[in-house]
Image: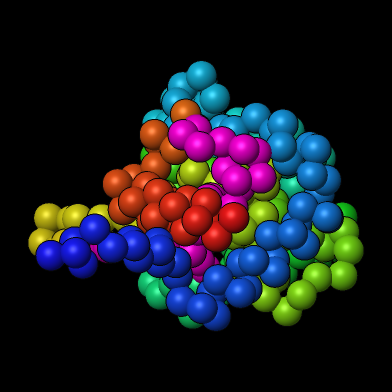
Amino acid sequence: MFGLFGKRSPPQCPVPETSRQWLDRSFPFLIQRFGEEDIKHKKILVPHYTDFPIRYDGNESTAWDTLHILTGQMGVSSKDITLDIYEGERTGIGGNQTIYLGNYKNVNPTEMDISQKQEDGKYHIGIEKKFLTDPEGLVAWLAHDLARIRLTEHPQPEESKMLADLATVVFGIGVFNANASYREKQTLDSWGYQRVGYLNQREWGYALALFAQLREEKDPAWAKHLTPNIRSDFSKSQAYLEDKG
């Protein structure tokens, strides 16, 4: 009987210990790299027409218009970027991606290193044509590659692709990359999930909680734009971090 009124169990961290340690180590690294005050006052972009006044109708101009918004947000010169838009299907996740290409512009993005400028003096970002009608996926894809470019300004850890995902959070674009990390995919004859990026759902929730903690936001308006699963992990992570002090 008395046990009913005993001390409550502390909130549990929703991510495995190895993930928590990496995130707790990498987030301060990004704060130091890109400036705490700037991150605290960074405008947060959300999936709304006010932030992306673009008609995603499949026209190539949508990719360029999105790029200009993101380069302004992330401190990259759009003059240093070129987009290689191609037909094809992508399978796999993270570093195990396989891309089957048509003959669109004779470009094979799998052979390019986004972190290095090409012979024309520009960074090349490959975009699957299907993203031209997928605003969230397009923003997430571009934000990740632009983050990789920003990270090349200084020596970076080996986990550069994971760090680029995490960097989208401090640049105020984490809502898009978090939501795109695990999405339902349905066709006429199949159903499943599609993952974009290198962090998983629970890691995104924890990363966004670290971001909110830095900005002293307990119930941020931008969190309302997270998918239910991500927002659940975000709330659990917030509870854990608050209890941890």
- Locate residue 67, reporting x and y percent: 64, 38
Magenta-highlighted residues: 192-220
Q: Within the magenta stretch, is there residue 194?
A: yes
Image colouring? rainbow
Q: Quadrant of residue 136?
A: top left
Q: In the picture, which quadrant includes the N terminus?
A: bottom left
- Locate residue 126, reporting x and y percent: 59, 57
Residue 223's place in the image compared with 137, above or below, is: above
- Locate residue 89, reporting x and y percent: 39, 65
Please tell me which residue is depicted at 76% across the width and 75% down the height of the picture. Answer: 157
Residue 224 in sight? yes
Please tell me which residue is depicted at 33% across the width and 61% down the height of the picture. Answer: 8
- Locate residue 162, reporting x and y percent: 61, 68
Circle count: 0
Foreground of the two, 37 or 94 = 37
Residue 100 in sight? no
Residue 89's place in the image compared with 237, above or below, is: below
Q: Is residue 24 left or right of residue 194?
A: right
Foreground of the two, 245 or 182 = 245
Q: Quadrant of residue 182?
A: bottom left
Q: Within the magenta stretch, is there residue 243?
A: no
Please tell me which residue is depicted at 34% across the width and 62% down the height of the picture. Answer: 7
Please tell me which residue is depicted at 55% across the width and 60% down the height of the picture. Answer: 244
Foreground of the two, 213 or 206 = 213
Q: Quadrant of residue 194?
A: bottom left
Q: In the picture, which quadrant includes the C terminus?
A: bottom right
